[in-house]
């Protein structure tokens, strides 16, 4: 099932506050009560056409976004690095999260901002030290994500917090798919319609069970936490006034425009 978060349009009787829903195959959204991660998935009688709502980030994590770096060998090579022996992790603040069709804001202090298409994991329950064979018990679903990075600041700082932590630097969406099973699906990134990244999820150095197990051994994961699983080769700049789209086969496409600060 595809879980969406949205603001109803002015011509509806659903109010002005963001709501959660299930995007159905007929293009309608079945409204659900509460937050599906905390309250469970409970349909109401309300239904609304997708075209009559503004789609939002499917979730705003209350805690953290955990990211895995250097998880595709071709990306490691293009960055002139070495394949890591274990996952390399870092954090993005929850304030970096935006949704489909929201605007990525280019910060004044950077001269180069890059796209990075990634598969995102959404955690559904409090967990610690999760065995690889039990990751299905803690994963709520998956999304498409774009790990926006100020590449010049990453090089200048020698670490990744500032470069990846700006507001708007974590587009996610367009929904959370609770039935998606990662395998050989292709992930792509395009800038103004030109393909820049293309790989398969199976090209990851560390697979999903390894990532969730490793991260949960380091820190307690909370409901709504997001884990970004790394990007393949082909990273490159986006431009002010341009559009960047990232997609994963069977999981959807996420598009954002870029504007100056």
Image: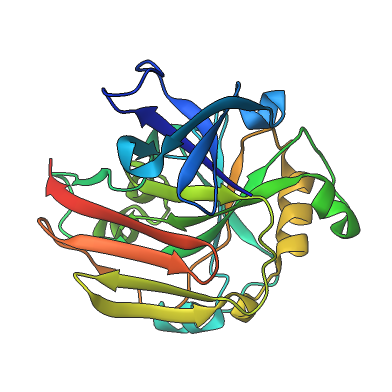
Visual colour scheme: rainbow
**Observer-nearest of 208 and 137:** 137
Counting from the top left corner in percent of width and height, residue 233 is at 42, 79
Residue 95 against residue 137 in the figure, above or below = above
Counting from the top left corner in percent of width and height, residue 185 is at 58, 76
Counting from the top left corner in percent of width and height, residue 215 is at 71, 50
The residue drawn where x is 47% and y is 61% is 252
Q: Is residue 208 left or right of residue 19?
A: right
Examine the rendering and report whether any part of residue 80 can be seen: no
Q: Quarter of the image containing the C terminus?
A: top left
The residue drawn where x is 36% and y is 71% is 189
Q: Is residue 112 left or right of residue 164?
A: left
**Observer-nearest of 115 and 69:** 115
Label total for image: 0
Q: Based on the displayed image, in which of its 4 quarters is residue 212 positioned?
A: bottom right
Examine the rendering and report whether any part of residue 238 can be seen: yes
Residue 189 against residue 140 in the figure, above or below = below
**Observer-nearest of 12 and 208:** 12
The residue drawn where x is 38% and y is 64% is 246
The residue drawn where x is 38% and y is 78% is 197
Q: Is residue 86 left or right of residue 63?
A: right
């Amino acid at each position: 099932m595809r879980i969406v978060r949205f603001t109803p349009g002015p011509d509806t009787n659903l109010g002005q506050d963001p709501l959660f829903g299930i995007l159905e195959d007929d293009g309608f959204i079945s409204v659900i009560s509460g937050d599906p991660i905390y309250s469970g998935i409970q349909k109401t009688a309300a239904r609304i056409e997708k075209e009559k709502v503004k789609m939002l980030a499917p979730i705003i994590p209350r805690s953290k976004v955990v990211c895995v770096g250097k998880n595709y060998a071709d990306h490691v090579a293009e960055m002139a690095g070495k394949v890591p022996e274990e996952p390399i992790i870092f954090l993005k603040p929850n304030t970096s999260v935006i949704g489909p069709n929201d605007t990525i804001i280019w910060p004044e202090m950077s001269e180069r901002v890059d796209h990075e298409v990634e598969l995102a994991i959404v955690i559904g329950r409090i967990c610690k030290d999760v065995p690889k064979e039990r990751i299905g018990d803690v994963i709520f679903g998956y999304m498409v994500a774009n790990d926006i990075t100020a590449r010049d600041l990453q090089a200048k700082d020698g670490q990744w917090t500032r470069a990846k932590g700006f507001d708007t630097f974590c587009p996610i969406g367009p929904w959370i798919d609770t039935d998606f099973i990662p395998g050989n699906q292709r992930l792509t990134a395009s800038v103004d319609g030109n393909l820049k990244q293309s790989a398969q999820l199976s090209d990851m150095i560390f697979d999903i069970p390894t990532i969730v197990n490793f991260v949960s051994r380091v820190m307690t994961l909370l409901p709504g936490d997001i884990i970004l699983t790394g990007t393949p080769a082909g990273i490159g700049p986006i431009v002010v006034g341009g559009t960047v789209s990232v997609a994963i086969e069977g999981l959807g496409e996420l598009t954002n425009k870029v504007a100056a600060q």
